[in-house]
Structures are given as structure tokens and as C-alpha cells.
Image (tube, coloured by chain):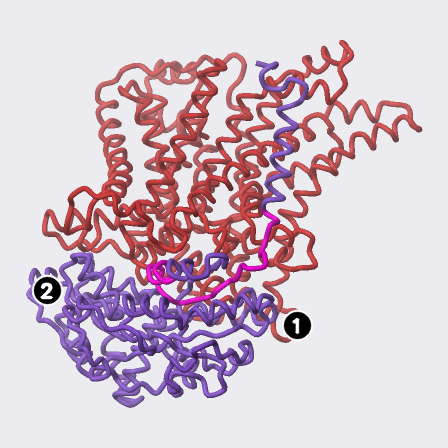
Chain colours: A purple, B red
Amino acid sequence: MTAFMFSKHSALRHLLAGVAFSAAMGMAVAQADDITVYTSYEEDEIAAFLKRAKEDLPDLNVNVLRLSTGDLHARILAEADNPQHDVIWGWAVTSMIDPRIGELIEVYEPANIERVPAKFRDKDGKWFATTGYMAAFCVNKEVLEKKGLPMPTSWEDLLNPVYKGEVVMPNPASSGTGYLMVSSILQEKGEEEGWKFLQGLDKNIAQYIKSGSRPCNAASEGEFAIGASFALRAIKNIQSGYPVAMVIPAEGAGNELEANALVAASKNKDAAKRFLDWTISDNAVKGYYDWKEIVTVTGGSMPENFKEAGLPEDISSVLWDMDFAWSAENRQRILERWQRELER
Amino acid sequence: MMSAIVTTDLPRGKVSNRIRLGVLLPTIIVGIPLIVFVLYPLVQILGRSFSTRDGFGFGNYAAMLGNERFVRITYNSVDMTLTSTVLAVVLAYVFAYAIQRSTLPARGLFRMIAVLPLFAPSLVQAQGLVLLFGRNGIINRTFGLGIDIYGYWGIVIASVLYVFPYAFLILSAALAVADARLYESAQMLGASKWRAFRTVTLPATRYGIAAAVFVCFTLVITDFGNPMVIGGDYTVLASEVYNQVIGQANFEMGSVIGMVLLIPAAIAAITEKYISARQHALISEQSKPLIPRPDRTRDTLLGLVVGMISVAIVAVMAVVVFASFVHLWPYRMDFSLRHYAFDVQNGIQPLWNSIWISLMAAGVGVVVVTAAAYVVEKFASPATRLLYFLAILPAAVPGMVLGLGYILAFNNPSNPVYAIYGTLFIIAVANVYYYHAQGFLISSTSMKQISNRFDEASATLGGGRFHTFVKVTLPLMLPTIVGVAVFFFMRSMVTLSAVIFLVTPHTQVAAVSVLYLQDRGATNQAAAFSVCIVATVVVALLAARLLLNIFGYRKMPLIR
């Protein structure tokens, strides 16, 4: 045994060599064409988009940190003195137009920027929005039937006491989907009435969930009857075979655009710009049309299964006309009030 | 101790100075990494908790205490932790009693079931409970019930299952030793079995019970995996640290809550050390080992409890495995492998990262704790007391607090450790130091058992200290080294707490992937990832067992 393990100290030497090697491996950090991207796209969206990016930019290694919109907002501000990322990708316009964020990003207009209509671009050229998402309810038909509940059609319907403990919605402080819901309700009903509505809704809410997609997933699995979430999650879950229906709130669906920007402190701007150019390339846009209910760039059309799930071809007919500037300006105030009055 | 006496007995002068340096140097070499990787991060976090916008002060603490929500969350944490701890220790005591003091059949099998939760990340318990008892879980669907598992009781049950093996291992060790003479006397004096249990067994195991209580308390109050999955809107301190730091990037508040968590954990650890030091005095050389005699009533009752606990542990794990293999939980239960495709952006890479980290942690951990144990044993000096303290200090530090300390200490380009910041290696290092105390104690216990006479013999035959260490001590310690390596590997595969703040987009680990997948509601995929972790741990354990068996150490326990 002794001979096997420790002849001429070789085993010990190997072990030490291994440790040194591990340390060296660990030290191989960011190389030239390695960029770090912060995003709030969903995990499966990221996977689909990056697969396409790899086809076009095989030499670019994209490291992605995915956080909920609100979480990412806090993180970027906290890291402001020493930013760790090169690109912000697919992140709520409402957050992007925060002036504190504006100081951290710099003007960059990618090749073919004219593909993005001017109203979806920052007038100073600091960001451009390629995609967006809208609020929708995932309603579990099996649960409704079992419990004899009516199918809701609007936010107003959700106040009905029969839904007590059957509704889950995202926490607006961390989830972008949650914030666009709260913000659109306040815009539609006016602040005074809006807060009253949220207080009333609170009585039926079983849980405020940190993520925007989990309410839909929880409803899809039948854990709750209704999950307030976003349209694409509902469509994908219907496609997977869950007994769910997508309901677009009759008041008009709150919505949000997702924008991209170059980080001013990036140490790797050339690679970052290549990636940003790619985000409005044909291949990227094809990916958007497969995965997003709102695409600002032309070059594709809405897939059949989106329509089958109940999305109208002219999506603007069901969208609430969001005042993004108002959402952004009042974000902190609204969230503070929400946390004070409604957070559990 | 021996060397210390030798040193002072030597005539003062050149020789003694040289020896003193020779004694101190290894202590310093082994001590420096402990200072860098344990003490320094803790000092950083303490400092950060006092740093406010207008300088140094109690501002953050005042803000926390004045916040009604924080007070409520603190109360939630303590309430939930106390209930979980009491339940876990009582159940584990009965279970351990059945294993050590009864003639129940298949005790070996039950022992394995008891430690099963160690093979999985903490949140697997909550995952399984939701699948079983969720509003649309198997139980409610099958029996048409309306059980709502989310919240207080969900966290309590998940936590009890999570810490059960820790309590069981401690209590099982406490119940393993007993002096049969005491029980014979009790019987002769006409004491009933119940009375004998109350007056002999219980007092003899009180230190074990106390140790189990403290270990469980610390584990539960600092666990955030289970509360995040099953807690619903019932918020606890551990999940709040996670939200403050990951969500809001609020390091000051995160540090304050970290310090709040550190206090009970530190008190628990110190008291446990104090208490367990007294345990050994209970058995003397004249003791007669107790051999359990058959008793049908006792064994039936114990069997019932043991059976129920075992079913609970196995069911929760089994349903996770099951869910990972069905097409669409809970609507299409036909077999499918699609959740193992891992079509998320990093795919299966986090599992490889975890395996690589765990191997590094095993390698580095063995070297570090063996060296520390060796120096404490063989180079005794007043300085080794300090070394011993540093070596067991991590037992008092919750993993999240250590991880947070690492960000504050090392995410700073002027710190030399920054070179490995954001790598897999620093995650391995964090795991080594988080579990340092346990690894060190296993190593030093075994080192004590290797008689000094071997060293003396080797020295007489002309072997130097290093030669003796490599040729004599190390080979004798082989089974312990394998055990320590397995310990570090296992814990590094499943731990969430120390690593959660250290993972980056390219150093994601498997347990964190499970958390992320579960957090966004991808239940089946999260289950599949958990299964991969458990499978890896089981394979590693079997490999280590095989290795030990080949070298003839069949009796050596691997899980502790």
C-alpha cells in the first residue's frame, strides 16, 4: 500500500501539481473576445438567441448574467463604480431611461440601426429597443372546472371574491412584468383609484412571486387557478400541453419594451459593438419573431401558434398605450409605496 | 503538548531559538491561509455592516431594528427555526435509538435512508414536498384534498427533512456508547424500562442532544433554499439576505442581516464545543458495552416511527426523481427524457463546474486540513492554540456570511486574491474553508490515534520529520484522507450557501442552477438537475467505498 501511494513522494507531488494547475486554470479570466452581457430575457429565450449568435459570431464568447428586471437595476447601480459588464441586452426601457443608468451607457448606433423605427430608439442614440412583452393571465382550465370558477376576462374580474387565494402575480419590485402590471393599472385607473384597486386585488392574491414567469408556470401546473404573467409564457405553456388558456386583460394589456445598450466602462468595446450589431441582424430578428410577442424590427411575422393561443395579428389593438416616461420617472416612488403597503 | 514541554526544558540559547522557530514556522505557514480566507472576510463583513452614507456608525442596525417588516421577518425566522429544530432532534433521537439500542431488522438499510438527504442540495426537500403536497400535488389530486403546503409548515417540514441526517449522525454517535453496568443496576433496583431510559439513557446523551440542537438550529436559520421554494410569502432572514444582496445589491443591509445570523450560529457553535468536550468523561475503562436485547413492544413501536420517517425521506426524494422523468408534470405522466436536455443557456455545464469544483475542494481540503491537524498535533506551542481556534472557527460561520465576506474582501483589484476572484477555484476555496472545522476534526482525531511511537521508531531509524510524515503517518492515515476527501466532495456538490454569492455567469454551479430553475418555475428541469447531482454524489461515494474495500478498510464509515 505504501509503495502504491507514496513511492518517492510522487503522489504528493502530483497532488501539488494538480493544485497549482487548478489555480492557473482559474486565473485564465476574460480574453479578448469574451464579453459579459447583463439581460432580463428569459432563460429559454437567451438559449435560443445565443444559439443563433454563435452561428454568426463563432469566435465571440458571450457570458450572460440573467436577473429579473428590478434585481438587475439594483445590481447595475450598485456596480456603477466598477461595472462588470460590456452590454445591456433585452432590458426594460422603463429601467433604461433612468438618468442614473443613462450615465453608465454610451451612444452607439449599430450598423443598420434604421431597421428599428425611430420611436423605439433613444433620441440621444444611447439605446434601441428590439423586442417587448405584454401582460397576460395564464388560467388553468382544469382548476376552474374543478372549483366551478368563471373564466376571468379583465383585471376588474380578478376582484371577485370567488378567486380568493387562487391568484398569483409577480412582485413588482423585482419583476419587470410585475412593475408593468402595477404601472399600467395606475395609468388606466388614475393613481387614486389604481391604488384602491391594488388593495382590493391583494385580498385575492395567494402569493407575490419574485419572477415574472413563475406565476404562469405555477398556474400551468395547477398550483393556482390564475397566474398573472406575460403572453409568451402562456403561449409556450399552451404549446407544451398544459391545460391553460391565455387571457389578455380587457382593460388593455400593460406592456414593456426591451432595449440594448453599450456600457461606457466596457473594456472590450469592439467585441461589445459586434454583438450589438448582431442584435438587429436578420438571424437575430428571426429569433425574436419565434419568441417575442412584440418585435419592433421588420423582417418576420407572427408564428401561427401565437395566433392560435389568442394573440391578435395586430397586437397594438390589445395593448394599453403605455407612458414609459411616466413609468420610469415614478418607478421608485411607486415601488416604495407598494413595498410599504403591500409587500408581505 | 509534548514538544512544548521539550522546548521549555531545553537549555536557553541558540538551540532553543532554533527549535522555537522550527516549531513556529509550520504554525505560521498553515495559519496564514486561515487568516486570509476565514478571519479577513469576517472582519470585512463586520466593517461593512457599520459603514453608512455618513461614515461609520450603527445607522444600518438602527434602520433594521426600526423597520417593522424586518422585525417580523426576524420573528418568522426564529419561530420557524425553533419548531424545526425541536421536531428534527426528537425524531432523530427516536431513529438513532432504534438503530443503536434495538434489535430492529434492517438497521443498516434504515441508517442509509437516514443520511439520504445529505446527497442532495437543501432545496430538494422543498421540491419534493411541493410535488407531493402542493395545491395540485399528488396527494391533493389523488384524494381530492385541499392541503396548502406553502408557508410556515412547508418550510418546517422541508427543514426537518434537510437537517435530519445531521441530527441523526450526532445522536447515533452519542447512543452508540453505553455502560451496560448502569442498566443492570437499574434493572436490579426494580426500575421500569421507561424509568431506566429517563434516568440513565437520557442524561448520558444530553451532550449529544445539545450538540444536535445547536447544529440543527444553525443549519435551519441560515438555509434559504427551502424557504425560497416552499415559503410562499412567509419571508425569513436567510431569504432576505439573498434578496438584499443578489436582488438589490444592498451589501450594507446584507452584512447587517449576516451579522444578525452570525450571532446565534456562533453562540451555538461555542456552546456545542464546550458541551461536547465533556462527553468523553462518561465512559471509563471498566465500562461494559451494552448489547441490546430483543423486546417486541419496544421494537414494534420504534419500527413504526422509523418506518414512517423513512417513508417520508424516501418519498420526497423519489417523487423528485419521478418528476424528472415524466413528460409534463402533473398532466402527462408518461416517461420522457426531455428534461435532461437542459436547453437553458449554460446547459449541463454547471454540473461539470460543480464536479470540477468538488474535486478541487477535495484535493485542496485534504492538504489544508491534514497540514493543520499535523501541525497542531506535532508542533505544539502556545501559537497552535490560536491555530486550533482558527481551524474550528468556520463551524460558527453561516455559509452565506462567509460567501458575502469573500465578495467584500476579494472583489477588489488591489487584493492579491482578486487574481482568482470570479473563478471556479475561489468557489472551491470557499467550500474548503466553510467546511474546514469538520474536515480538521476528522483529521486530527485520526492523527491522535496514530501512536507517537511510530514517529519515535522512525526517528530512531534515522528518518527525518518530513520522511516520517510521508512514509509513516500519511500511509496510516490513508482511510482518513479518503474520508476527508469524500466529505469535501460531497458537501461541495450540494452546498448552496457559501457559493451563492460567488458564482458568476461562467462559473455557475449545479445546486445554484436547481435554485434558478425552480425559482422561475421550471419544476421538471429543476428536478432533473437535482437528480444529476444526487447521482454524481452516489457514484463518488461508491468509488471511494470500492477504493477503501480494496485496501482492506471495510469498516471505515464514509459519511459523518
Check disc 1 and report its element: helix, strand or loop: strand
Closer to us: A313 or B110: A313
Check disc 2 and report its element: helix, strand or loop: helix
Q: Which residue is mark 2?
A: A144
Q: Quadrant of residue B178?
A: top left
Amino acid of disc 1: Gly
Residue B321 lies in magenta, yes or no?
no
Tag nearer the camera, 1 or 2: 2
Q: How far apart in space, not on screen, are marks 1 and 2 (Cα)? A: 56 Å
Is residue B472 found left or right of A317 in the rendered image? right
* Residue B543, position as x, y percentages in the image: 43, 25
* Residue A257, position as x, y percentages in the image: 35, 77
| Tag count | 2
Label 1 and label 2 in one chain:
no
Q: Which residue is mark 1?
A: B55
Q: Residues within 10 Å of mark 2 (few under 14, many from 20)?
A: many
Say which chain tag 2 marks: A
Span colored in magenta? A26-49
Q: Residue at x 34, y 44 (%)?
A: B530
Closer to us: A216 or B308: A216
Is residue B328 found left or right of B269 in the rendered image? left
Amino acid of disc 2: Leu
Q: Quadrant of residue B161?
A: top left
* Residue A339, position as x, y percentages in the image: 38, 74
Q: Is residue B188 above or below residue B217?
A: above
